[in-house]
Amino acid sequence: MNLPDYFLADLPPEAALSRTMISEACQALKRNRDQHLMRRSTNSLIGLLSALAESWLEADFPFRQLALELGPRATGFSAATLGAGLDAFFGQLAADNLRVLLQQELGHSGRLDQFVSTLSEPRAQRTALATGPRLLVHFAAGNLPCPTLMSIVLGLLVRSGQFVKCASGAALLPRLFAHSLYQVEPKLGACLEIAEWKGGRLELEQALYQEADCVTATGSDQTLAEIRRHLPACARFLGYGYRVSFGYITHEVLSSYGAKKIAARAAADVVAWDQHGCLSPHLFYVEHSGAVSPELFAEMLAAELAKREATEPRGEITVTEAATIASRRALYEVRAAASPDTRQWQSQGSTAWTVVYEADPRFQLSCLNRFIYVKAVASLTEAVQAAEPVRGQVSTVGLAASGEKGELIATEWAHWGVTRICAIGQMQNPPLTWRHDGRPSLGDLVTWTDWEQ
C-alpha cells in the first residue's frame, strides 16, 4: 500500500522543511477548519470516529496491517505489543464512550453545537456554548503513539484545525491514522497536518507558535519550559511533563490463588508498551503478613513475565539500553549474594525481563524495558514515606485491595497527590474519560461563551 503525499510527513527524507512551508500549512488548516469542520455536528463526528475505530480493530484493515508490518522497526515495539496497544486504544473509541466524555467534560454532549443549559442553569436564565481553538498545535512525545492519536481525536471533537509535530522518527502511527481519516473523509483529513523533525529547530517551531491558538506538548520538564518560553502571550499552553507510576498490593488479597491472578495482572502492566510512558509501573509495593510474602510474589511475577515474553516479546532496544540493564543486573547480583534482603530473577540469554526484590522500601526508578522492582512494606504509611522523593510527579497508582480498605488507601494516595488510581492490570489502559494529570483532557481545550438571557 503506497501512501499519497497528503502530509508533510509523507515527503521524502531529503525534502527540506522551511518556515514558509509551516506557516502556509497552518493558514491552510485554519481555512479548511472554517469551511469543513465547523459545519459538522457532534453526532456526525462521533459516528465517524467510532466507525473508523472499528475499522482499526479489524485484522484485515490495510492501515492496521501497515502499522503492524512497519511499526516494529519504526517504534521499537514488537508487533504483538503494538497490536495489543492499538486494540486497547481503539476499543475505547465507541460512540457511547465519546458521548460520556463530552457529558463529563462539558456538562452536555451538545455544547459544541449550540447554546444549551444544564439542569441548574435555566433558573439563572443562562446557556453556554463551548468552542475549540481555531488552530491546535501538538508537540507529540516520541515514546508512545496512542497519546498522540488521542490528542487528534480530542481536537476533531472540538473542531480544531490541527498541526501535529512528531519527534524525529516517530510519525508512523499518527501518519497512518491521519491517512485513514483522509480516506474516509478527505475534507476532514485536510484539517489535519502531520510533520516530523528533530526538536530544537526554532525557525520551524516559531512559525507554529505564531499561528497557534493553543499548544499542547508532552515531554520532559525542560522541553515544556522551552516551548512555554517562546510562545506568544495570546496562545494557550497545555503541558504534560515527567511523571512516574507504581503499584500497591495489600496483604489481604495475597492468598495463594489471589496472588497468582494479581501477579498476572501486574505482568500485564509491565509488558504494556514495554514499560514506557508515564503510566507504566517502576515498582510494586507489597505488604507483609499475607499468605504470599512479597518475596514470593516477586518470584510469581517473574514467572508471569517469562510467560508473556513467549507470547508478547519485548521489542528491540538500543545497545545503550541493553548495557544499562546488564549493569543494573550486575549490581543486584552482588547485593543478592551479600544479603537475603535482595533477590533477582531474569530472562536467560537476553535482557527481555528482570524482577528485583528488595526489603528496602525506598522508591527506585526502573531502567524500564520490563525491568521491575518489588518492594516489601509493613503498611501504607511506610510506602507513602518511601515514595516521598517522587511526590508531585506520580501519575498512576495501580491498586490491589479489597472493600473498605481499598477506599481508605485510595483516599490516602489521592490526598498525597496521585491523580489516577486504578486496578492493577489496567495501568496502561486508562478509560477515555481519564483526566490526564488530574485535568480535563477535552475541557482544557475549549473556550466558553455564556449567554445570559
Image: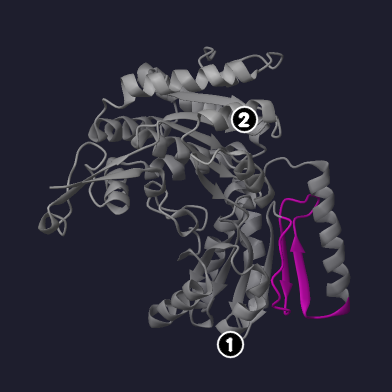
**Magenta segment includes 383:** no
Q: Which residue is mark 2?
A: 206
Q: How many marks?
A: 2
- Circle 1: element type: loop
Question: Label 2 sits on what residue type?
Answer: Gln
Which residue position is annotated with label 1?
A: 289
N-terminal-most mark, 1 or 2: 2
Q: In the shown orientation, is residue 59 left or right of residue 203?
A: left
Image position of 64 with respect to 28: above or below: below
- Answer whether residue 293 is visible to the viewer in this image: no
Residue 61 locus on image (x, y percent)? 43, 25
Labels 1 & 2 near each other (Cβ < 8 A): no
Q: Is residue 126 left or right of residue 204?
A: left
Q: Which mark's residue is nearer the viewer, 1 or 2?
A: 2
Magenta stretch secondary structure, dominant: loop
Q: Residue at x 50, y 70 (%)?
A: 399
Residue 242 placed where, x, y %?
63, 54
Residue 247 vs 128, above or below: the answer is below
Judge left or right: residue 343 versus residue 216: right
* Label 2: how many Cα within 10 Å (few below 14, some 14–19, many 20+): some
In the foreground, 264 or 367: 367
Which element type, helix, strand or loop, lies under badge 2? helix
- Of residue 125 and residue 315, the one placed in the foreground of this image is 125
Who's the residue at 52% across and 66% down the image?
398
Q: Which residues are magenta?
A: 338-367
Q: Tell me the number on the disc at residue 308.
A: none
Q: Position of residue 304 (x, y in %)?
A: 61, 60
Q: Is residue 351 magenta?
A: yes
Q: Amino acid at mark 1?
A: Ser
Whole-angstrom CA distance, mark 1 to mark 2, is 58 Å
